[in-house]
Image (cartoon, rainbow, N blue to C red):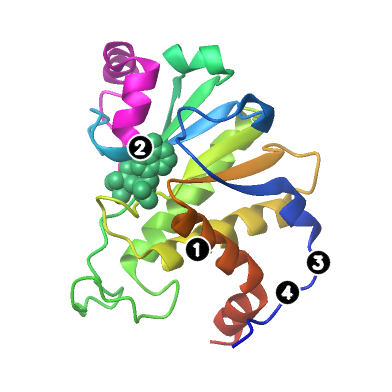
Amino acid sequence: MSLPQAAPDARLDRIEVVVGDITDLPDDLGVDTVVNAANEPLAGGAGVDGAIHRAAGHDELLGYNRTHHPEGCKTGLVKVSPAFGLEAKGIKHILHTVGPVWSGQRDTGVPGAPGDDTAKLGYTLEDTLLASCYTNVLKAAEQLESEAVAIPAVSTGVYGFPKPRAAKIALGHVLGHFQQRPAPAFPKRVVFVCFSDADAEVYRQAIDTRDAWMFTQRRG
Ligand code: ADP
């Protein structure tokens, strides 16, 4: 079955999907800001968080966050830190955001089965919280006058958020932001960093089919 093809969209010129380690991106991507999939205490952890703490320098990053963000970071919010060891790679800022843990819980309070991905997009509490991560990341990147911000697939690892659903939320928010703030507004570009080809394909599918699912959501 062929997928519905979307019309050309200038906003997509500001979006790249790459496969790689967010702490070791090629210089020619021009990334100056990276997003960390952090946890609420900002203490470092597994996955992206572990990689960023290792590359930036765990002690320095932890020390900074304990001093400047002693309250940690609530789910859906963003805290900014310097990039420390990542500065050698041209990174100036780390945006620590805490994605929701996927439970399948509906906004109505009616629990779905764990991992239930049948609710309409935007209708779960986790959708709302993940959307808040992207809104706040984009706002911070704008304020920091970021050239290019690298964003991993927040919540889709240990936190178990369904990947296609998360990619649509990510893409929808970035497109919405670019709609409101046309080039050359900051951030000038967003780089979605995926850990595997399969994960990148999820983003490409979301991009290619966006007219279908965004249209469906509007008419919902
Ligand atoms: P969360 O706890 O928010 O789910 P994870 O770090 O466990 O965050 O995973 C988020 C996503 O990032 C997953 O899709 C995972 O495969 C991917 N990932 C893990 N490590 C890296 C890395 N070093 N660079 C880019 N993506 C990564």
Give the labeled residue for mark 1: 202
Q: The magenta stretch spans which residues?
A: 48-77
Q: Residue at x 37, y 27 (%)?
A: 52
* Marking on residue 6: 4
Question: What amino acid is found at the position of numbered circle 2 in the picture?
Answer: Val
N-term mark: 1 or 4: 4
Relative side of 23 to 191, left or right: left
> CA gap, disc 1 to disc 3?
19 Å
Q: Which residue is mark 3?
A: 8
Residue 31 falls left or right of residue 125: right
Which percent across, then down, holds residue 169? Answer: 50, 62
Q: Main secondary structure of the magenta part?
A: helix
Query: Would you say the beta carbon of the disc 2 residue lies within 8 angstroms of ligand 1?
Result: yes
Q: Amino acid at mark 1?
A: Val
Q: Mark 1, mark 2: which one is toward the viewer?
A: 1
Foreground residue among 192 and 26 = 26
Q: Position of residue 37 (x, y in %)?
A: 36, 40
